[in-house]
Image (cartoon, rainbow, N blue to C red):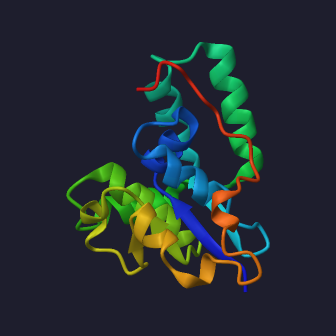
Amino acid sequence: MRKKIFLDTNIVIDYLSNRIPFGEDALRIFSLPPQQCQLCISALSFTTIFYVLKKHFNRSELLEMLNSLKMLVEVLPTDEDVISSSLQSDFSDFEDAVQYHTALYGNASFIITRNPKDFGKSTIPIYTPSEFLQIPYWMNESNPTILNEPEVEYYTNPKTP
């Protein structure tokens, strides 16, 4: 059964910017076989990614990256229901509440973040990238090195943030 994997914005930024030391695990997540999982992000993540990475890439590079990203992930809506639930939640950080409720309404099976403590109230299993990649399910038994062989283009930037 194909799983929906919700990526917190920090994982996507790690992937797009090749942020050391986090970019490698992010690449491995983006390289998971699409027949096993659907990567998902919040629509809200696009604005955050643009804002954070505009210091390191020019506008046309960023737009190209975001267009490519859009092809790799399912973009989950951040709608009125998500906002209402987020406003009523016990999350201390509103942005984390919005990310969580976007994943919840999008029926995500997992949330991957570098900050699991930010999602302490989650009913969805939370993993760091390294924890998630240790789950045997993601290893292809006929090719145990599959996670080391990227299937997607990896953006490199000499001015890594």
Residue 139 location (% of width, % of height): 64, 77
Nearer-the-camera pick, 11 or 103: 11
Residue 113 location (% of width, % of height): 40, 59
Image: 75 above or below 4? above
Q: Quadrant of residue 67 in the image?
A: top right
Residue 96 location (% of width, % of height): 34, 55
The residue drawn where x is 46% and y is 25% is: 160
**The C terminus: image quadrant:** top left
The residue drawn where x is 43% and y is 28% is: 52
Tell me if I can see residue 77 in this picture.
Answer: no
Total label count? 0
Q: Is residue 4 left or right of residue 6?
A: right
Tell me if I can see residue 25 in this picture.
Answer: yes
Q: Is residue 35 left or right of residue 51?
A: right
Nearer-the-camera pick, 54 or 92: 54
The residue drawn where x is 63% and y is 24% is: 62
The residue drawn where x is 74% and y is 48% is: 152
